[in-house]
Amino acid sequence: MDFALTEHRRALQSEAREFAETEIRPRAIELDREEAYPEEILDALGDQRYAGLTLPETYGGRGEGLVELVLVIEELSAALMPVASTLALHLGVATVIERFGTDAQRERFLPEMATFDTVGALGLSEENAGSNKLEMGTTAERDGDGWRLDGHKQWVTNFLDADYVLTYAKTGPDADAPHNVTAFLVPTEAFDVDRVWETLAARPVKSPRVSLDSVHVPDEQRVGEVGEAYVQRGEIHTGVNVPARGVGIARAALADTVAYTTEREQYGRSLSENQGLRWELGKMAERVDAARLLTLRAADRADRGAEMGRAFSMAKINATQAAVDNANDAVQFHGGVGHTTDHHVERYLRDAKLLTIAGGPNEGHKDTLAAETIADYSP
Ligand SMILES: Cc1cc2nc3c(=O)[nH]c(=O)nc-3n(C[C@H](O)[C@H](O)[C@H](O)COP(=O)(O)OP(=O)(O)OC[C@H]3O[C@@H](n4cnc5c(N)ncnc54)[C@H](O)[C@@H]3O)c2cc1C
């Protein structure tokens, strides 16, 4: 077993870290405070084809796997989490097209998606389809040579600057679940925007509620087989980006706290010379390493086509909670200035909290983990 990254992966990690440190981190506090869309940063990610990181080179992508995705996402999230989520959700949409779309769809959408000239967003959740997406109310009915879509989607990250929403709709009766959901690429201009929330986290990139009122979608924009979209979603594992975002925040919180507590002096010694605080720095490092190892293991299993079993749920629960715990400690150890926008740590805490909810709340992942654990350890 080799825990060392290959030279190629180390180079990619350094490249992403350099990008995050120079292009994102110096502007992160201002972007968050102004709730300003990170347009130039996303354009630069497109220019450097991070927007096609995991897409095949034949479609203009960089041909990387999920291990590489989590390495890049950790770096971006350490600088500004919503940049990482925008990229990851876009890549999730592109991956569904690549895996389950037609050749014509791959040729039409993927080269432009690889450069962010076409931006994808995910329309899965609804008001009454949160943890349980199969309770969605959006429907698609046959309409001549295409489909007629009615319903709404909620929390569509990056909707306001996206071109297409990969929209999941019921095309069969509930008795057929989960084989009753079909996915469509619906242009964003076909939706009405119902609500854009003010939020605790992810302030620069909005996730509004949007609706569809008898919108005709040609069959060429159906992605994958009729009725199979929900099952096919389970076969792609770009969701490992969520724990990777947790690793990024947990690591950034630790790095900022070491820097601050070794510099700041009280009682004639640096804060980090107090044993109680030193031990907590060690604990924060332990959380980062455990979260990263679990996340890389899940990504590696997905890349090798191995059974995911409990690997994903463990990574999701551990890494997102590590982000919350480290960000919380970081605010505490920065004292009063930690809860001001002079420092990054108060944002880490807000952005970390989102991660225990988005990508499926951790409680649902605990149910999955428990079921897998009992199955694995039953005599
Ligand atoms: C900022 C943001 C961005 C998002 N982006 C997207 C996106 O781009 N596309 C998209 O489709 N969706 C997106 N989501 C939706 C996200 O995946 C859902 O919010 C999430 O799945 C939870 O659904 P819910 O909010 O309706 O919570 P609910 O399902 O109502 O759950 C509420 C709470 O109940 C508890 N709970 C839930 N299930 C269990 C259980 N089994 N056992 C015990 N307790 C439980 C948890 O504490 C949970 O947080 C986003 C959400 C947010 C907030």
Image (spheres, rainbow, N blue to C red):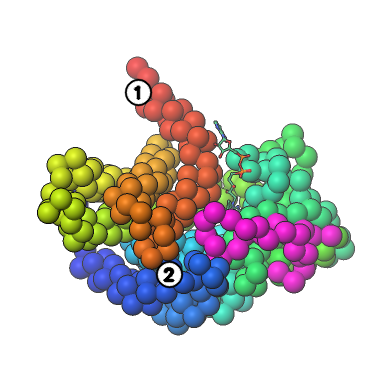
Residue at image location 36% in from the left, 44% down from the top: 325
| Residue 270, quarter of picture | bottom left
Query: Is ligand 1 less than 8 Å from the beta carbon at label 1?
Result: no
Position of residue 321 in the picture relative to residue 6 (left or right): right
| Residue 19, quarter of picture | bottom left
Which kind of residue does numbered mark 2 sit on?
Ala
Residue at image location 32% in from the left, 72% down from the top: 21
Q: Which of pointers 2 and 1 lies earlier in the amino acid sequence?
A: 2
Mark 2, other Cα within 10 Å: few <14 / some 14–19 / many ≥20: many
x, y (%) of residue 220?
Answer: 72, 68
Question: According to the image, label 2 marks what residue?
Answer: 28
The span from disc 2 to disc 1 (Cα, nearest Å) is 45 Å
x, y (%) of residue 103?
Answer: 59, 70
Q: Is residue 196 above or below residue 301?
A: below
Position of residue 360 in the picture relative to residue 269 (left or right): right
Residue 145 is tagged as: none
| The magenta segment | 188-213
Element at badge 1?
helix
Which kind of residue does numbered mark 1 sit on?
Tyr
Position of residue 158 in the picture relative to residue 150 (left or right): left
The answer to whether residue 110 shows anywhere in this view is: no
Viewer-closest of 181 and 71: 71
Residue at image location 68% in from the left, 61% down from the top: 196
Residue 377 is tagged as: 1
x, y (%) of residue 34?
Answer: 54, 70
Does the magenta run of residues contain 314?
Answer: no
Mark 1, other Cα within 10 Å: few <14 / some 14–19 / many ≥20: few
Q: Quadrant of the C terminus?
A: top left
x, y (%) of residue 226?
Answer: 70, 52
The answer to whether residue 378 shows anywhere in this view is: yes
Q: Nearer the viewer, mark 2 or mark 1?
A: 2
Residue at image location 28% in from the left, 67% down from the top: 13
